[in-house]
Amino acid sequence: MAENIDVQKDHSMVLQKQMIAEHYQRLADAPKTGDKVVYTFVPGNLTELIRSFGALPVLPEINALQSGMRGKSRDYIAEAERRGHSEDVCTYVKCDLGMVKGGNIGPTGLPLPKPDLLLLSYTGCYTFMKWFELLREEYDCPTVFLQIPYQGAGELEPEHRKYVVDQIKEKVIPALEQVTGRKYDEDGLRRRLGLAAQAEDDLVAVLQSAKQKPSPIDAYFGGVYYIGPIFSAFRGTEEGVAYYRELRKEVEARTAQKRGPITPDGPLDDQRYRLVVEGPPNWTHFRDFWRMFSSWQAVVVASTYTKVGGTYDFGFRHDEQDPLGTMADYCGGCYTNLNLPSRVDMLCNYIEEYGANGFLINSVKSCNSFSAGQLMMLREVEKRTGIPGAFIESDLVDPRYFSPANIKNRLESYLQMIDARAQGGN
Amino acid sequence: MEAPLTREEIVAWARECYEDLEFSAARKWLAQDPARKAIGFLPVYAPRELIHACGMLPVGIYGGGDQLEIIRGDAFYQSYICHLPRSVVELGQTGRLDFLSGVLFPSTCDVIRNLSGIWQLLSPELYVRYVDVPQIRDVETGGKFWRRELQTLVDDLGRVAGKTPNDAVLRQSIALYNDVRATISALYRIRCDEPWRIPTEELYLLLRAGEVVPPEEFLQRAKAYIEATASDPLPKKDRVRVIVVGAFCEQPPLGLIKTIERSGCYIVDDDLLVGNRMITQPVATDGDPLTHLANAFVEHGERTSVLYEERPEGKRTLMKERIDAAKADGIIFAAPSFCDPALLDRPMLRAGAEAEGIPCIAFQYAENTGQFQQFREQTGTFSDSIKLWGGQ
Ligand code: SF4
Ligand code: SF4
């Protein structure tokens, strides 16, 4: 999701930059061209459906994280807090609202259009509901609510799936028809779902390449870059397919050459630590944060954050044969919609499958959806794998909660502890 | 004939229930018959009728308040997460909840949602269900979904209880809870009309007791309390009328409620323990009981932060509606620290209130807050200013 991290010079990156620039240009032009704009969230996004109506998606979380990377989030958050928002709540929301109040200028410096529809895909996070209620106060446009039941019992129960399908049919599609003036085009949707599945295959191949030693990718710091197109506006598009084909080719070439990923410290071919990471990254100090790992030759081989927009590596693919059902399955399976035992299973699975020798939780202050329960997860994963974990705290886009010295110390002690264990100590 | 219970006796009983972190009332009820079982639920809303219809005791779990020392619970939560889940974990880890045969975790927020997973990991043998309440407030989509959820719950709870209720039994429980809600509503109405007759401290204790004792017992005491207060009104004081908003989940310590009242405010409406009156109309007791219960929730659910507000102007108008209904002078936004639902809602609610010229103050608390001086000053100044400059 970090579309403009300037760390890799591969062709796929150039492609991604182009795609994003074009998308934001189209958004900026929307008031003139008449393109309809739908604001929605990354987890549970219905990009194929939105695009099948010829509309363009805007993802507020992407705006927030981009503001964090561009050093603007501090001011945006301060602006929201001046307007009565509590210091205690999610900084993504405050960052986005601050940005809206500051003229709604998007990550490429172009203005973002107002939404024609707020499509609240209520997936895996309570705060989303309030975020769109708050955005609705800013815009005079319809809001459609799509409730995705939580997988409290460890699966999307059949009744829950039916509920999602019913809502897409009875609420979401009519709202899109109303706003765009177009009829629902199931064939067009199927075609896009087919394209989505192609890109998903390639993404999974990229993510699973990290099972190799050395890993040709960093599945957290590089991973957020790889998921950018598929988690945002490009799932179900030809550009998306082309991007993932190219990315996969590059990663396979690195695998063949036994090369590691390119990091802020250059290529990381010699990898001493293979880590699994739970939790979102910090965006305000993204490169510094990454460097804390790469300077110690630590590579992340699997991460849960790269599953917030879909858990494809466990087999899910969009299925053009069942367009509405597959969207329900997709939404239900996003990472933060999984219960804690499933999240623990996933982490244990990653540690084993990816041959990790450590795991780390980056607990962000903003996010109760991720963070509440992470200390329990830590203990549970330690118990089941026998590998001690590390726990660090920061925030997504509030620089006040990123303490470089603390995090660095903690990480370094942890990596030293891994060494000590490897040498037979405790 | 026995003499009717006095106000003091009822309040003393309620206080005992409230202070008792061993849940002795529930344990006593269970001890009367070895076949009996109890099911816990967290805030805000759980369909208690279904637990009752299965012959089990619904028990509200509201944390440990200011009486529980947190020793183990803090190891489960980072400092930036509200206090409630850590005291709930403390209750669990110290065996105080071991009389429960299951726990329901309603979709109040992500903290309670994830607490359901902690419970699953800590007590794999226990019945644990995350209850996703409907956010789509129409009978056709949300109502049907909720009807199916209620069916799943009845089936599950029936298995835990060893007997699944038929429709007649479900209707009886629904009727009983209609009575509970009507009685709570009567208490609120009287407090609104004559706040000197029902101090919020007493009302609150009574309602807290109602969360841990059988509904039949609560009804008997609550009705007796209404009668007792009719013949024993307290002196009327010169206080302003306020509503308290944001305290629906983690509960403020009793001392804070007392502080608000003693600093010159009558609380004439609030959202404390709102789950006990979440359905604002009686549920029909003919036809299919689960359909009626489901539809009553989607059509007549209380407007609170944990449910999606469908009306675009809804957040802006809600406070004015509440103030008018309660004939109140001002609003105290009192939210638990780090509480997403209350704190994310507050700017919208407050902006709507202030646009109508309604005086507001806001503060945050934790269930174990022990110092009330700052609140006393804030609410005291608030009431003085309303007296001086007028309220709404
Ligand atoms: S609480 Fe977490 S998941 Fe929700 S909007 Fe904030 S960062 Fe995203
Ligand atoms: S106090 Fe607020 S954040 Fe905490 S559990 Fe309750 S609703 Fe959730």
Image (spheres, rainbow, N blue to C red):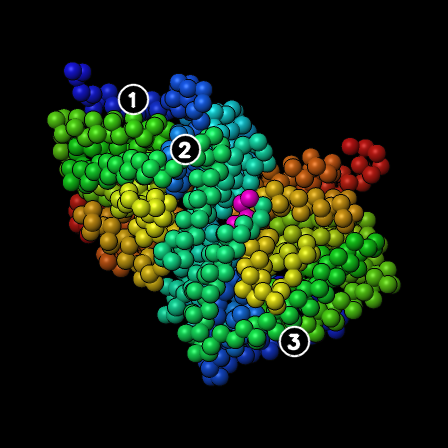
Residue occupied by mark 2: B54
The residue under the point 78% across, 68% down is: A250
| SS class, disc 3 | helix
Residue B39 in picture, x, y percent from top left: 44, 32
Q: Mark number for residue B13?
A: 1
Decide: marks 1, 3 in contact (CB < 8 A)?
no
* Secondary structure mostly seen in the magenta stretch: loop
Cα separation between marks 2 and 3: 55 Å
- Dot 3 crowding, Cα within 10 Å, few <14, some 14–19, many 20+: some
Amino acid beneath label 2: Cys
Amino acid beneath label 3: Glu
Q: Nearer the viewer, residue A201 or B206?
A: A201
The residue under the point 58% across, 62% down is: A326
Residue B251 in picture, x, y percent from top left: 38, 36
Q: Nearer the viewer, residue B95 or A412?
A: B95
Q: Is residue B306 left or right of residue A381?
A: left
Cα separation between marks 1 and 3: 70 Å
Point out the tag, 2 or 1, that comes first from the N-terminus.
1
Magenta part of the chain: A149-153
The single residue placed furthest to the bottom in the displayed view is: A32
Residue occupied by mark 3: A238
Q: Chain of mark 2?
A: B
Q: Is residue A100 above or below residue A148?
A: below
The residue under the point 31% across, 24% down is: B15
| SS class, disc 1 | helix
- Dot 1 crowding, Cα within 10 Å, few <14, some 14–19, many 20+: some
Q: Is residue B350 left or right of residue A299?
A: left
The mark lying in front, picked from 1 and 3, is 3
The residue under the point 44% across, 48% down is: B148
Q: Is residue B373 left or right of residue A307?
A: left
